Structure formats: structure tokens, C-alpha cells
Image (tube, coloured by chain):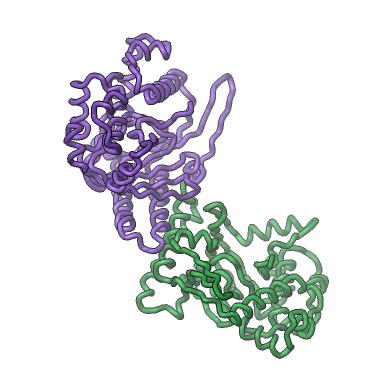
Chain colours: A green, B purple
Amino acid sequence: MTQGKTGRNGRQKDAGGGRVELEKSRMQERREKHYAAQENRLKVDFITDRGQYHAAHWDSDLEIIYLLNGNAAILLDGAQVQLVQGEFIVIDAGRIFELQCKESFMQIRVRVDKEFLSARAGDLSRENSGQGEMEIMNRRYSCQRDTLKAEQLEHFLEICELFKSMVPLYISEPAGFRLKTESIVLEILYLLVRHFSEEVRETAIPEVTQDLNRIREILAYIEDHYQEPISLMDISSEFGLSREYFSRLFHKSIGMTFTDHLTRVRIAHFYHDLTTTDAPVMKLLEENGLTNYKHFRKNFKELYGYSPRDLRKVLY
Amino acid sequence: MTQGKTGRNGRQKDAGGGRVELEKSRMQERREKHYAAQENRLKVDFITDRGQYHAAHWDSDLEIIYLLNGNAAILLDGAQVQLVQGEFIVIDAGRIFELQCKESFMQIRVRVDKEFLSARAGDLSRENSGQGEMEIMNRRYSCQRDTLKAEQLEHFLEICELFKSMVPLYISEPAGFRLKTESIVLEILYLLVRHFSEEVRETAIPEVTQDLNRIREILAYIEDHYQEPISLMDISSEFGLSREYFSRLFHKSIGMTFTDHLTRVRIAHFYHDLTTTDAPVMKLLEENGLTNYKHFRKNFKELYGYSPRDLRKVLY
């Protein structure tokens, strides 16, 4: 599979032509600061924005999202998590998640290459291929408030404090702040390794692995074709599954129906175009495959809190 | 100049042939642990040994030496500094220093590529070559107990604590200790940038630069030729200087006479061979250019606290 990242508000899209200027001023509004270290295997983003929506997707990096201000609703492997200010969540590589911030927020996002982390965690990966079975030693990370064990709480709070201490560095940028930022991130990773990870001897269970790979391929397919009409019939036969099986698999894995997900992917791309270009709303709806206007309107307001036209007024 | 590092107890020397086994066991005795990060631009060594002597040399890395146990006598640009347990000293790239630990000690040495550090300190280097003058923005680091300013003390102690916190990591190596070690080192570097460095607009003073370069070349020459007889006459004419000028320059820069330095370089190499091979003492003296036995004996005992034969008995 070549496309691992989908639905990231379509940021990789080319704004094209005369839209570049607007894109620029909009990015300044978002006040993003990006900092990469360790040959780009460690990335830190400081993001301030009025709202954010990432449709269900997965990433080959491990991701940590810390919320300094605002709220975030996260669907992680189909289960709902509410993130409140001052806390963080760890999303391990390969997990499927949807992220939504309705209001103004400030976020720190850390992304780490999983191999970089394994090497520094001292993990040894073994693959014994005997009788068609593969044994892989893998370190799984999991850290969110609602599933903390009692003995983890102190370390959870310690990491919250470490994130908090990154904020003044980001604002005032004292000499050497890059060293301190990287130092803090490495300490957070150390605490995750020690208190929020476990080494798993994965004797791959064929069905589970197959389902997960299917879902990842389905998400990638949607991301590639969202501008075209895609019916449930089309996509289930594309993957050689019955409509019923496809629907059940999709809902179980993503936490919503295929149609709702597709609409949200389209809306996320529509939102990107809406806020970075001055093209007419109707044209953007069409371009992004949004034909059911009523369904769209309800979903858009739910995700961003405004109608498209009102949102543009608020932003400019 | 190709040879920047001289007199490091000749560790790079090939022990050769049947001596490999002894070398190995001796290295275990030294209990060195080496940890490299950031594509080898950051190196951390944990060293435990019964004694150590590095003849005057310089390095293109910035070096931090922290002493957990024991004492160390350091000659830094010709001035004497005593390092006691629990403290550290920063030796900036290019500074000439001699290091001596007479007794058992435990040390943490951090070496950092100066360019790596500059990039992360946010330094911009400018070279304006107008009228043959070169202006270089350089960040100079200086941190040792005897020259601390009042406002630096708290940060000095903070760094001492950070070093101390590395010791249990080194001993027990918990999962992810590499992440924590690197995190601590980056934080130390951050504190050095903020509190123990200054940006210097260096309009190079020709004489000073010339003298320094000469001394570096002289040290490299000695390191290359110490096994041969080198008289003061030979070496001063080799560098096109009068004997008087050469002697004055050498003593001012290194803090001892040329003859004493030469003897110490030879002794450092002799010590390495003595402790890593089982060759007869007389043979090793000859190989390392040590012909004045009386002078040697006095110096050796001063540096290592034992006669050569007693030292071998103590070690094996």
C-alpha cells in the first residue's frame, strides 16, 4: 500500500494558481510552528486554529496529541474519546482515528517514526517463519485518561506537565529552545516506553490482520476516489465483499457507517478549499463530490459549528 | 591539519597479534560504556578506571567532563584546574587541555559536534571577507567552578544534578534508557547555550590565531614522532622558530616545557602498552622513545601513583 495518510484535511493538496496568497494568510492565522529533529523522524507541531476535522485515517508514525486549550473529540478504533484541555492521548502507529475540534484550540502534536522509537527503546524484532507463522516482537503504546491504571496516573500527569513546559519555549523561542524542545520530547517518549507500552509477542492472527489491512486499503481507496460518486455497492464489490459484510466490518472498525465517513472525508476536503480559496461554495461542493446538500449541511454544522457561508464571514 | 586528536592514551593504536585478548579483558576492567546519538554527533562515555592520563591535546568537539568519583587535574590553556567529585567542566572545541586522574574514578564524558550544537543553538555564522578581514559569529562556551558568576551558580548545580541522574540509567539500563540519556544531555546543552555561552563576533587577530595554529601543529607533530628522538633544536627549526621563541610559546600555551610534554606523551603511550600487553617493560620503554630512565620513573609515578612493575601487579 502506498498511501498511508488519508483525510488530513487534504493539506497535501495543491491550492493552485491565484489561491496561493489566500493559503498563505490562512496558514498564518493557524499559527502553526513545525519543528523536525532526528533526521525528520521526530516531528513537533504547535497548532492554533478555530476548528479542525480529520476524517478517519491512520498513520505509520506514533502520534501524541496534547491539548492546551479547547476540546477534541476522537474516535479511536471506533470508540469515542473526549480530550479536554491539559491532557494528551497517544495514538499508536496503524490505529485508525478521527479527530475533531469544534472550537478554537491550541494543540501540540508529536509524531515519531516507530522504527526510530523501537531502536531507542532497545527492542529486538524477531521474525521466525516456521509453518507459515510469523512471530514479531512489537512494542505497543497505549495512553489515554479513561483507561489509566492507578499506578500510571503519576506518570500521565508528569507527561502533561512536560507538554505544558513546551509552551513558553514555543512562544518566546529563547536561544537553544530547539535543544530543550527535543529534550522534553525524548523524556516524554522515555516515560511512554517505561509506563505506557508493552512488548507483545505477536503471533499474527490471520483474520484480525486481514480485516485491518482491508480497512486500511478501503480508507486509502476512499481518499483517492472521494470526488467521484461511490456507492456502497461499488466499493464492497471493489473489495470482493458482500454489502452486508462490508457494512458490518466498516462500522465495527471506524465507528460510523461508510456513507457518513465518505461524507466527512468530502467535507474535510471541502473545508480546506473553503478556507484557503475564494471559489464559490456551490462549485466547491461539486468538486468535492457533495451532492446531497441537506445531508451535507447538517454534517458540516455538526463538525465546524457554522454554515459554510457563516464560516467564511467569521474567518475573513 | 589532518590530525586533531593527540595523546589520547594512544587508544587508537593497534595492540596487534596475541595481545588482543589482554586488551579485551583490560577494557572490561575500565568498564567503559559508549553511547552515540544524533548520527554520531553526540557521544556519551561512562568511564570507570584506576587512573588516567591524557597529554595536552585539543579536539574539534566540545567536551564536558563530569566526575562522579575521584579527582582530576586539568591544565586548560596552560592554567591549572582541580576537578572534584560531583562537578563538571566544559572544554570548548579547539582549547588545549591535559587531563590527569591519579586514583580510581568514575567519569561521564560528553562530546558534541560544534556544528550540530550551533545549528540547534540557532546561531548564524557570517563570513564577511572585506579587506582581507574575516568576521565570524561564533558561540564560545565556558563553564568551570572557579570562574562562575553568582547568577550562574544555580544553573551549574542544575547541570551537576542532571549528570548525577544519568548514573542509575547507566547502571540499571531500564527500557528506553537511551531516550532518557539523550534527553538529559540535550537539556544540559540547552542550559550551556543559555547560561554559559556567548556569541562572539570574531574579527580574527592574526598573531593569536597564528600562535594557536602553530601550537596545534606542534602537538600533532609530537604525536607523530614521539617514538623518535626529538631535540628542542630539531623541533624549533622544523617550525622555523628560534629555540627561545619556541620554548616561550610552548610554555605559555601548554603550561609546561616542551621536554616535559614530550616525556608525558611518551609515558601515556607506554602506559597504554603496559596495561594492554605483556611485553617486557624495557622493550616498551625503548619502543616509546623513553631513554632517560630516571626522568621517566619520577614522571610515571607522579602520573599514575605506581612504578610500572607495581602497576602491572595491581592490575592483574
Can residue A102 be seen from the camera position used here?
Answer: no
Q: Position of residue B306 (x, y in %)?
A: 17, 34
Q: Residue at x 42, y 36 (%)?
A: B140
Q: Position of residue B31 (x, y in %)?
A: 30, 49
Q: Quadrant of residue A256?
A: bottom right
Q: Quadrant of residue B166?
A: bottom left
User: Relative to A94, is B9 above or below?
Assistant: above
Q: Residue at x 63, y 78 (%)?
A: A210
Q: Which residue reaches farthest bottom?
A: A244
Report the quarter where the C terminus of chain B lies. top left
Front residue of A46/B54: it is B54
Horizontal side, residue B280 vs residue A269: left or right? left
Can residue B117 be seen from the camera position used here?
Answer: yes
Q: Residue at x 79, y 70 (%)?
A: A284
Q: Position of residue B177 (x, y in %)?
A: 38, 59
Q: Position of residue A129 (x, y in %)?
A: 55, 70
Horizontal side, residue A49 vs residue B269: left or right? right
Front residue of B176/A80: it is B176
User: Relative to B176, is B199 above or below?
Assistant: above
State how many labels appear: 0
User: Relative to B219, is A39 above or below?
Assistant: below
Q: Quadrant of residue B91?
A: top left
Q: Residue at x 52, y 79 (%)?
A: A82
Front residue of B292/B256: it is B292
